[in-house]
């Protein structure tokens, strides 16, 4: 029975990976068990996690290609068998992994004849290709001209508009979803007189993230979506004369001084600075001084941040802007203020 195979805690909800398989470079599988839940709760959590895994987990994709002298996507390149259209379709399928949210440039320059694969792309730092063998084209000689590529990190699916692009510029409909498929199932078990439930989640990824990483990122992003509701109080809701309820967004996204320890403090300890989507240099500087969560970051004033090695005024401004835009928080300007507002 399931309850005999998986240890069940009757006090705290816990999860663990019970199966992990790398079927290929571009197909990873993971199966996770979470318990115990009261009857009916598994469906609520399972549906939310499925939607968050498919829609909220970020991925990296090629979004644009440029080649001088090419008028349209059905043109051909000298010494290349495929048309530009065929190459764009193949570039769309390439799986990448990036640690940066900045827009990156890559280049495809090949001396043939040879079979051109993803491994032939000259990639920038912080970007790696998952499968070097992914096919792009076949050349019969030196490819001319070279192809310039743009790499971005985002979430979901983006359909590019052809308007505004010049000859030789070809936007690519990008698939940023690293999760290929996700499924959940409910298994009841009895503890004494009560019937509780176990949630099983299955995740398949394209290799740019592991199922474990995808599950963690989906969970964090799902929590972030509910932070405004955690911080909202009855006073944030006002009623108009016609009895329609209106939410004042300015009041709901109030600064840090409206967050109490039992809600905001706990939430910010669970949110990592990855959610701020900071530039790679700023992000790495924070990690080097063991700033991992929003709670850690709020213990530093703007003065403290400027004392971090290679962390200048521009980086402080980027952090302050990200805190306000993502969480409506003003970063502390001096040490005494930071200590007063510190989340225990």
Image: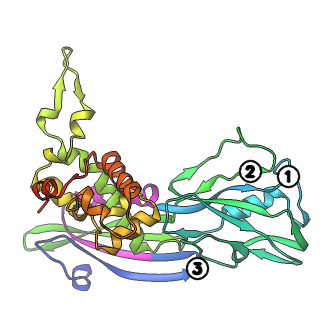
First of labels 2, 1 by sequence position: 1
The residue shown at (81%, 46%) is 167
Which residue corresponds to mark 1? 70
Q: How is the image coloured?
A: rainbow
The residue shown at (42%, 68%) is 214
Q: Nearer the viewer, mark 2 or mark 3?
A: 2
Q: CA distance from mark 2 to mark 1?
A: 10 Å
The N terminus sits in image quarter: bottom left
Where residue 25 is drawn, which disc sits there?
Answer: 3
**Measured from the top left, where is residue 339 in percent x and y?**
12, 59
The residue shown at (26%, 50%) is 226
Residues under numbered marks 2 and 1 in contact, where contact means CB atoms less than 8 Å apart = yes
In this rendering, is residue 204 above or below 87?
Answer: below
| Crowdedness near tag 2: few (<14), some (14–19) or many (≥20) residues, C-alpha within 10 Å | many
Boundaries of the magenta span: 30-57
Q: Is residue 115 magenta?
A: no
Which residue corresponds to mark 2? 170
Q: Is residue 38 visible?
A: yes
């Amino acid at each position: 029975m399931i309850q005999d195979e998986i240890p069940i805690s009757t006090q705290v909800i816990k999860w663990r990976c019970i199966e992990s398989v790398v079927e290929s470079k571009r197909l990873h599988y993971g199966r996770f068990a979470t318990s115990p839940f009261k009857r009916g709760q598994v469906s609520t959590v399972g549906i939310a996690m499925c939607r968050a895994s498919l829609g909220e987990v970020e991925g990296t994709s090629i979004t644009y290609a440029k080649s001088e002298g090419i008028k349209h996507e059905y043109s051909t390149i000298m010494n290349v068998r495929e048309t530009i259209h065929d190459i764009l379709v193949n570039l769309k399928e390439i799986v990448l992994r990036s640690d940066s949210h900045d827009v990156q440039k890559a280049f495809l320059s090949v001396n043939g004849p040879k079979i051109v694969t993803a491994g032939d792309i000259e990639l920038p730092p912080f970007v790696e290709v998952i499968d070097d063998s992914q096919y792009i084209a076949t050349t019969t000689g030196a490819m001319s001209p070279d192809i310039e590529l743009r790499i971005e990190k985002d979430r979901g699916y983006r359909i590019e508009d052809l308007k505004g692009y010049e000859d030789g510029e070809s936007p690519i409909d990008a698939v940023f979803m690293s999760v290929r498929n996700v499924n959940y199932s409910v298994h009841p078990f009895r503890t004494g007189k009560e019937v509780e439930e176990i949630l099983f989640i299955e995740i398949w990824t394209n290799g740019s993230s592991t199922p474990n990483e995808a599950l963690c990122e989906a969970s964090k992003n799902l929590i972030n979506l509910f932070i405004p509701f955690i911080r909202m109080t009855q006073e944030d809701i006002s009623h108009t004369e016609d009895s329609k309820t209106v939410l004042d967004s300015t009041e709901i996204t109030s600064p840090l001084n409206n967050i109490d320890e039992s809600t905001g403090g706990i939430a910010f300890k669970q949110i990592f600075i990855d959610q701020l989507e900071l530039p790679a240099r700023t992000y790495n500087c924070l990690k080097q001084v063991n700033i991992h969560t929003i709670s850690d970051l709020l213990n530093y004033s703007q003065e403290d941040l400027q004392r971090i090695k290679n962390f200048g005024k521009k980086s402080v401004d980027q952090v302050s802007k990200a805190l306000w835009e993502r969480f409506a928080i003003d970063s502390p300007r001096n040490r005494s203020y930071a200590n007063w507002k510190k989340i225990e």
